[in-house]
Amino acid sequence: MRQWAVAAIGLLVVSGSVGAASPKVARMVFLNTKPGAKATMEAAIRRQMDWRREQQDDWRWLTWEYVSGDAGRYAVATFGHAWQDYDQSKVSPWIEEVDAGALAALSATPPQVQYYDHAEEVSAPGVAQDTPTLAEIAVFQLHFGKTASFYEAVGQFHAALEKAGSPGRYEWFELLNGGEGPQFMLFLPRRNWAAFDTPGELLMGALEKSVGQRRAKQITAQFSAAVKSYQRHAVRLRPDLSKLPAPANPNP
């Protein structure tokens, strides 16, 4: 099996979570900042979040900064919505259009807007409910017609981890609109940088115990054959650029 496939499968042994959501349509806006405009871009995002608080926007908005790959890249996301929520939102959900297009003007390329479905059936909510501050994102671009085969393999991985009693958390998302498909994204919270060192042998061991060595090899080969390309990124949460719920008062 290819080395990248081993690494990708190993990503499933993780900790932390974005949290399962139902309804489950997420909207994500990806921004690539022009050279030298990072501080101005962050000021524009912060201004939008302040505006949303003033408007009493009841949606939760998270801003993630990419800390690997292209510098000055951000993802602004809101999770857990039904499609009709975008018609009935109290405050405009088109964050890239608020503030007279400031985000677009500061972007090296037009903001990319994508909608994802949270694949709850193959995701693990885990125990902790806090929003992670560091995470890894793996994006799998599939060959056309291979969605069912890929999803079946992911389901087998998920079942094996559940059977093994793994406490790890992971979130799968399927691209619905806004980019080349079929595409799946795996969101993997990390406690720290040391947690990025995740051995694939742990998942393979769980899979072999669940379905046997021969079937485990077939499933990993099926997973690998469905993937056309694969990207891996590290991101960190920017609470100062997000709109999070107010912390609960410990002494009401």
Image: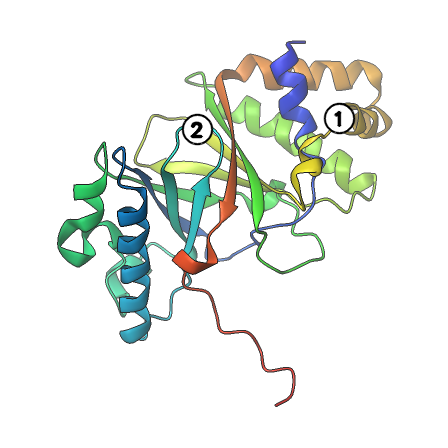
Q: In this view, does 239 lie to the left or right of 14?
A: left
What residue lies at 56% left-to-right and 24% top-to-bottom?
A: 150
228 or 52, which lies in front?
52
Work out which quarter of the rendered image holds the N terminus and state it. top right
Residue 158 appears at what percent x and percent y?
69, 36
Amino acid type, label 1 = Pro
Residue lying at the far bottom in this picture: please name it: 252
Q: Name the residue under label 1.
A: 199
Q: Can residue 185 be seen in this view?
A: yes
Q: Name the residue under label 2.
A: 183
Residue 219 appears at what percent x and percent y?
69, 19
Label 1 environment density (alpha carbons within 10 Å; few <14, some 14–19, many ≥20) = some
What residue lies at 27% left-to-right and 70% top-to-bottom?
A: 90
Residue lying at the far top in this picture: please name it: 1
Q: In this view, does 149 lie to the left or right of 191?
A: left
Secondary structure at badge 1 equals loop
